[in-house]
Image: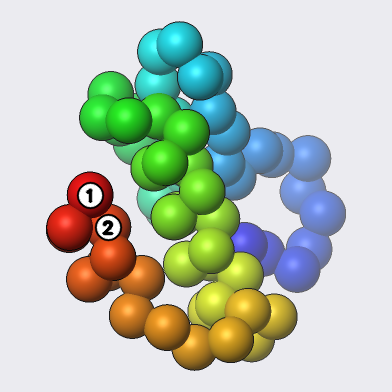
Amino acid sequence: MDTTDNGRIDIGCCIEDKTFLLRGDKYEWCNRDSLLTFFMQLLYMLQKQGSVPAMEIDKYYKVV
C-alpha cells in the first residue's frame, strides 16, 4: 500500500464474486475464495509496511 493518498483503491473484495488488487497500474482479479484471498493479501500488504508480525503468509495460503 502506498503511503500517499492518490484516491485509488488498492485492494477490495466482493464476497460472492471476486477479490481485486492493484499491481502497478492494472487491477488483478482473483476468483478463488474471495474473502480468504482478500484477507491474505491484506496481511501481506500490511506486513510489507511492518505493521503485522512476520509470518510466511504464502505458505499458509498454499495449504488452503
Residue 64: mark: 1
- Circle 1: element type: loop
Q: Amino acid at mark 2?
A: Tyr
Q: CA distance from mark 2 to mark 1?
A: 5 Å
Specify the color scheme: rainbow
Vertically, is 43 above or below 42? below
Please name the residue shown 69% across and 80% down the image.
51
Q: Amino acid at mark 1?
A: Val
Please name the residue shown 56% across and 41% down the image.
11
Please name the residue shown 51% across and 48% down the image.
39
Residue found farthest to the top: 16
- Circle 2: element type: helix
Residue 20 percent coordinates (x, y): 45, 33
Residue 27 visible in image: no
Q: Where's the N terminus, which quadrant?
A: bottom right
Label 1 near label 2: C-beta < 8 Å? yes
Residue 1 visible in image: yes
